[in-house]
Amino acid sequence: MGSSRMLLLLWPLLMGLGLEAEADLDGEAYGLDNRLSYVRRENDAIARLYENILDVLQCRLPRESGAQIKVGKDALLAKQPVQDQNWRSPKGLGQVSGVAIDPAGRPVIFHRGDHIWDFDSFDEENRFTKRMDGPIAVNTVLTLNPENGQVEDEWGSDAFYLPHGIYVDAEGSVWLTDVALHQVLKEGTAEPEPSLVLGERFVPGGDARHLCQPTSVLVLPGGEIVVADGYCNERILLFDPMGRLLEQIPPRGNEDMLRLRVPHSLTLVNHNNVCVADREHQRIVCFNLTRTLEEGAPGRKEQMLSWLPLVIHRPGACRIFGVTSHNNMLYAVNGPTTSHNPVMGFTLDPENGSVVSTWAPTFDSFSNPHEIAACPNGTALYVSEIGPNVVWKFRLLTNWKM
Ligand SMILES: *[C@@H]1O[C@H](CO)[C@@H](O)[C@H](O)[C@H]1NC(C)=O
Ligand SMILES: *[C@@H]1O[C@H](CO)[C@@H](O)[C@H](O)[C@H]1NC(C)=O
Ligand SMILES: *[C@@H]1O[C@H](CO)[C@@H](O)[C@H](O)[C@H]1NC(C)=O
């Protein structure tokens, strides 16, 4: 059946759902998501087609009134992040897929050198096809001076194939995800070998021992490891500090509880809420991790969770690539989604999902932002891009004296 004919047949369904969707557009889209899950059970192909249409429609809605990008003093007054003019992005970087902050408050980036992710990087089973080309020869992990962007430390040559996410934990250990390796690696500061590895090298999979193009990693105050897995599995995994799987979201057998489409970036809000940039769904999803761990305790028979996640789905936000938080506020960056959606940063209130402000570089613009990280003392935000390959610094105004 041709897709236009499919669309015609689908139209009454779209109208029926569309009306409902419209009512939900301005807020959290629980109703809509539940409905989509239902439709998907009935017919997966139709649900996916409908989702794609809906996504494009939502992305094309004008952004909210009052959410204009302000510059200079106006931005200061509006408490928007403002580009730091003293900062210089390092030269000669590959795609800067990841940025994180170390315990000293310095940005640490993960970049792809001369490797890029193109259409034939993976085969149909998600296996990396360019292993023969060898790993990236240059240093891929760079620690930068937070004032001026100069490289202060660098390592990670001849080890990675397609870098993605980076996280630095409270001890200064660096956690990296490589989508070609299908692994998460914990790199200590002293020893040459990773001190913990999740997933099997170059082997994609969806069970407890395998990952598939994992995107992002986060370590909780108790040492538990949260992994966004990823481009093909579309699940969030929780591991204990030794790397044993504790729980997965959505729970096995109850995938309709929370459908994710490319969980791309993770952050922690309010100590126990994990928020995920659910990229292709153009939304941020937050869930109570304490409750997840309690309810998913071993021995529990039915893999159901009694709670609903918070779904932040704003019209005009489009595909959300990166999310971070400071002081119970979310900061996110979107990316190109339609031919004319504005690419920008968002400040969001996680209590009700409202957009507090939108922002962008003052004298330039974002092209392909990929990840964002907030300095724990609340003075800076860093955004990395994958073309042009740059790192931006913004002054975060929460701690600015006026
Ligand atoms: C915040 O952290 C940065 C990076 O370590 C540091 O340069 C700056 O002085 C700190 N600012 C405050 C107000 O603590
Ligand atoms: C998370 O769940 C725990 C345990 O059920 C509960 O005590 C806590 O209040 C919840 N936190 C939030 C922010 O909802
Ligand atoms: C969202 O919550 C914040 C406080 O948590 C409040 O200041 C703001 O007015 C709320 N926005 C909306 C649209 O309800």
Image (tube, grey):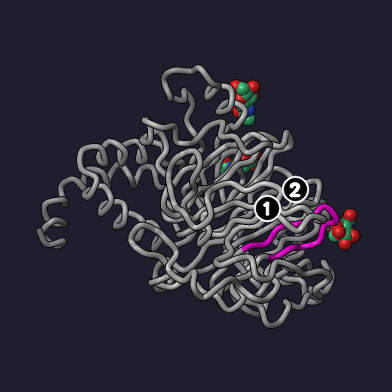
**Which quadrant: the C terminus?**
bottom right
User: Which of pointers 2 and 1 lies earlier in the amino acid sequence?
Assistant: 2
Q: Is 102 contained in the magenta span?
A: yes
Q: Amino acid at mark 1?
A: Trp
Image: magenta residue range: 98-109
| Residue visible at 72% across and 76% down in the picture | 89
Q: Amino acid at mark 2?
A: Asp
| Residue visible at 62% across and 45% down in the picture | 349
Relative horizontal placement of residue 319, taking residue 188 as reference (left or right): left
Mark 2–mark 1 CB contact (< 8 Å): yes
Q: Secondary structure at mark 1?
A: strand
Q: Quadrant of residue 20?
A: top left
Relative horizontal placement of residue 355, taking residue 210 as reference (left or right): right
Specify few, some or many for label 2: CA neighbours under 10 Å numbering under 14, 14-19, or 20 or more. Answer: some
Label 2 vs label 1, nearer the camera: 1
Q: CA distance from mark 2 to mark 1?
A: 8 Å
| Residue visible at 37% across and 40% down in the picture | 33
Q: Which residue is mark 2?
A: 169
Q: Secondary structure at mark 2?
A: loop
- Above or below: residue 159 compared with residue 183: below
Q: Which mark is residue 175?
A: 1
